[in-house]
C-alpha cells in the first residue's frame, strides 16, 4: 500500500472507532467538555482527528538532531564499512576503564578478536530480544522527535559475557564520531539500571530494529543504545564501545550543555491543531499530543481563558483554573497497520495478545481531542496540561527547563464575527 493510502486508511479507522466509542458509551468528550448536547461531534473535530499524525513515526520521518562533521550517517557506504557502521562490519568493544578499573575477566576487544559482532548479537536476540513502544524526545527540543517500537537485546546480556567480578559502579558508552575526540558523544548509566528494571520499566537495550525494520543509519544503526525512560541523549547512536568503570558519577557529553543528565522523561501536553480565529458561539475543535513520562498520565486537561477576565491566580501553573478534561484517543488497532513491528512470534512489553494492557502506555506519546463550546466575541488564551498517575498537575512548578519540559503551552484564539 502506498504511504498516503495507508495513512488515510489508518485515520479512517481511528476516526471510526472514536465515534463508536463516544456513541456507544454516551460519555467521554462530549460530556466532559460539558456543553455539547448528546453525542454530536462536529465535523470539524472529526476532521481534526482524522488529520492527526500516525501513531508510530516512520523511521525516516523522525526528527534528526545528530551531531558530527560529517554526520556519521551521511558517510559514503565504503567509509561506513571501513569504520564498522554496517551490519556486516559492526563490532562492539566492552572494556574496563583504565582510569577507574572495573574487574572483568573477559574484556571484548577488536585487537583480541573478541569484540561482539552483529551475528553474535543476533544469537543473543534469539533468546533475549524484547520490544517496547517509546517516544524519543530531545531534552532540548520542545516536541518529541518520533514514536516507535524499539527492538533489542538487554544490555545486561552483553555485560554478563565479560564475566564481571568486582569494582563496577557505572557504564560509559559512546558511538562513532569520525575518530575525533572533539566530536565524541558519550553517555552513562548506573550499573544498577543496567542489571535491573525498576517499577516495570523495560530494560536498557542494544537496539537494532525500529518498527520492525532494521535500524537505519540515520536512526543510529546498525546498533544504538535505547534507554526507555530517559531523554534522547542517553540513547547513543552508532554504538561502538562500552566502558565498565568503578567511577561513581556521570560523564555524559550532554552535561556540558547545562543539562540535568539524571532527569527522566516528563509528562506534559501540547496542541497539534487549534483554530486561531473562530466565529462567535461556534464550537472549537482542538487536538494535541501528550508525552507519558516517568510519572504516568491520567488526564489531559484544557482551559480557555478570556483575556479581559484573566485568572485571579498569579504564577505560571494555574492550579485553581477551571480546567476540563479532554479525551485521550484510544490505542490504534493492530489490523490498521499502526503497530508496525508487532508479529505473533514475539510480544511487546506491556502488551497481551497484541493489545496494550493499560492505556495510555508508559513512556509513549498519545493523542487527545476536545470540542470546546462556542464563545462570545473576544480574545482568549487556550492552555493544556496533564494530570499524572499520582494526581499531580504536570508540568509541575519545576523551574529548570534543562530537567525536561517545564511550562504550560498557551495559544491565542480570537473569536470574532
Ligand atoms: N552518537 C550519537 N548519538 C546520539 C546523538 C549524537 O549526536 N551522536 N544525539 C543524541 C540526542 S541529543 C538525541 S535527542 C537522540 C535523537 O535520536 P534520533 O536522532 O533517533 O531522533 O540521539 C542521541 N544519540
Ligand atoms: Mo537531544
Image: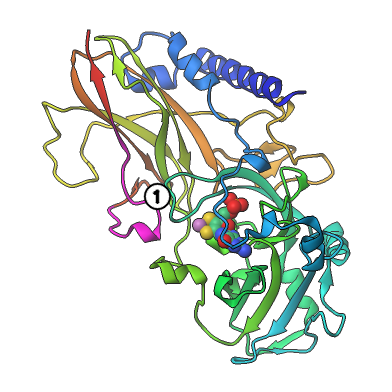
Q: Is residue 37 left or right of residue 245?
A: left
Taking the magenta stretch, the answer to whether it contains residue 404 is yes
**Ligand 1 placement by image quarter:** bottom right
The N terminus lies in which quarter of the figure?
top right
Q: Position of residue 70 (x, y in %)?
A: 62, 61
> Magenta segment, which residues?
397-411
179 up-or-down from 228: above or below = below
> For this rendering, which residue is in front, 412 or 30?
412
Q: Position of residue 195 (x, y in %)?
A: 66, 71
Q: Is residue 413 left or right of residue 67?
A: left
**Which structural element holds mark 1?**
loop
> For this rendering, which residue is in front, 211 or 74?
74
At x 85%, y 80%, the residue is 114
At x 40%, y 28%, the residue is 326
Taking the magenta stretch, the answer to whether it contains residue 231 is no
Q: Position of residue 160 (x, y in %)?
A: 76, 76
Amino acid at each position: 500500500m502506498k504511504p498516503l493510502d495507508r495513512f488515510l486508511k489508518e485515520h479512517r479507522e481511528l476516526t471510526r472507532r472514536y465515534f463508536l466509542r463516544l456513541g456507544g458509551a454516551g460519555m467521554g468528550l462530549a460530556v466532559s467538555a460539558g456543553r455539547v448536547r448528546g453525542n454530536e461531534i462536529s465535523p470539524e473535530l472529526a476532521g481534526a482527528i482524522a488529520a492527526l499524525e500516525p501513531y508510530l513515526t516512520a523511521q525516516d520521518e523522525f526528527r534528526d538532531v545528530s551531531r558530527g562533521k560529517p554526520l556519521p550517517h551521511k558517510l559514503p557506504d565504503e567509509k561506513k564499512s571501513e569504520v564498522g557502521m554496517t551490519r556486516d562490519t559492526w563490532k562492539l568493544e566492552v572494556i574496563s576503564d583504565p582510569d577507574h578499573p572495573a574487574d572483568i575477566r573477559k574484556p571484548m576487544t577488536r585487537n583480541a578478536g573478541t569484540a561482539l559482532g552483529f551475528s553474535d548479537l543476533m544469537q543473543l536476540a534469539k533468546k533475549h530480544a524484547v520490544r517496547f513502544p517509546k517516544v524519543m524526545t530531545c531534552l532540548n527540543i520542545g516536541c518529541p522527535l518520533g514514536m516507535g517500537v524499539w527492538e533489542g537485546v538487554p544490555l545486561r546480556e552483553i555485560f554478563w559475557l565479560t564475566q564481571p567480578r568486582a569494582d563496577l559502579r557505572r557504564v560509559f558508552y559512546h558511538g562513532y564520531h569520525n575518530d575525533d575526540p572533539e566530536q565524541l558523544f558519550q553517555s552513562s548509566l548506573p550499573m544498577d539500571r543496567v542489571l535491573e528494571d525498576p517499577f516495570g520499566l523495560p530494560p536498557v537495550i542494544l537496539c537494532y530494529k525500529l518498527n520492525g525494520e532494521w535500524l537505519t543509519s540515520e536512526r543510529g544503526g546498525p546498533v544504538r543504545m535505547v534507554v526507555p525512560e530517559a531523554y534522547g541523549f542517553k540513547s547513543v547512536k552508532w554504538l561502538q564501545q562500552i566502558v565498565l568503570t568503578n567511577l561513581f558519577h556521570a560523564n555524559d557529553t550532554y552535561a556540558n550543555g547545562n543539562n540535568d543528565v539524571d532527569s527522566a522523561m516528563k509528562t506534559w501536553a501540547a496542541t497539534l491543531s487549534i483554530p486561531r480565529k473562530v466565529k462567535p458561539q461556534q464550537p472549537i475543535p482542538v487536538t494535541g499530543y501528550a508525552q507519558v513520562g516517568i510519572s504516568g498520565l491520567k488526564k489531559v486537561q484544557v482551559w480557555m481563558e478570556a483575556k479581559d477576565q484573566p485568572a485571579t491566580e498569579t504564577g505560571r501553573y494555574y492550579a485553581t483554573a477551571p480546567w476540563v478534561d479532554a479525551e485521550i484517543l484510544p490505542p490504534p488497532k493492530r489490523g490498521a497497520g499502526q503497530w508496525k513491528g508487532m508479529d505473533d512470534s514475539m510480544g511487546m512489553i506491556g502488551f497481551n495478545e497484541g493489545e496494550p494492557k493499560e492505556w495510555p502506555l508508559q513512556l509513549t506519546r498519545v493523542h487527545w481531542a476536545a470540542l470546546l463550546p462556542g464563545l462570545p466575541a473576544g480574545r482568549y488564551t487556550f492552555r493544556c496540561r496533564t494530570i499524572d498517575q499520582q494526581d499531580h498537575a504536570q508540568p509541575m512548578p519545576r523551574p529548570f527547563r534543562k530537567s525536561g519540559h517545564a511550562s504550560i503551552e498557551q495559544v491565542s484564539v480570537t473569536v470574532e464575527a
